Image (cartoon, rainbow, N blue to C red):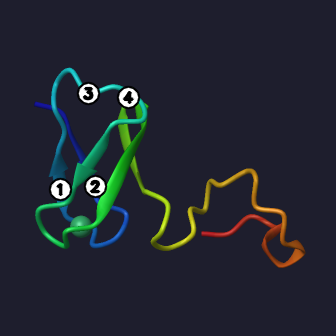
Amino acid sequence: MPTSVCPECDEEVYVDADAEQGDRIICEECQSDLIVVGLDPVELDLSDGSEDSFDDDDYEDDEYEADRY
Ligand SMILES: [Zn+2]
């Protein structure tokens, strides 16, 4: 079973082997609502409603224009 790292708590998260991009997963560690944003390797991001995604391209606020980590 593929694993990835929770962007919220940095714990390992198990992802279904047949997960697809856009699938939502709940982190068992911190109960964050995560979304699968990549499959090779599996990447997870916080889903909307929580913290900002640092990969969010459609964020239009000037303060967030520069790359953030
Ligand atoms: Zn977590």
Question: In which quadrant is the N terminus drawn?
Answer: top left
Front: mark 2 or 3: 3
- Rendering quadrant holding ligand 1: bottom left
Q: Which residue is mark 4?
A: 39
Front: mark 1 or 3: 3
Q: Which residue is mark 1?
A: 12
Question: In which quadrant is the C terminus drawn?
Answer: bottom right
Residue at the extreme right of the image, as rendered: 62
The secondary structure type at the circle numbered 4 is strand
Name the residue type under label 1. Glu
Sequence-wise first label, 2 or 3: 2
Crowding at dot 2, Cα within 10 Å, few <14 / some 14-19 / many 20+, comes out as some
Q: Which residue is mark 2?
A: 5
In the picture, measured across the screen, residue 43 lies left or right of residue 56, that is left
| Disc 4/disc 1 C-alpha distance (Å) | 15 Å
Q: Is residue 29 above or below residue 45?
A: below
Q: Is residue 48 above or below residue 8?
A: above
| Disc 4/disc 3 C-alpha distance (Å) | 8 Å
Name the residue type under label 2. Val
Residue drawn at x 28%, y 67% is: 32
Sequence-wise first label, 1 or 2: 2
- Mark sitting on residue 19: 3
The secondary structure type at the circle numbered 3 is loop
Name the residue type under label 4. Leu
x then y, percent, for residue 10: 27, 67
Residue drawn at x 65%, y 55% is: 56
Crowding at dot 1, Cα within 10 Å, few <14 / some 14-19 / many 20+, comes out as some
Between 32 and 13, the residue placed more toward the observer is: 32
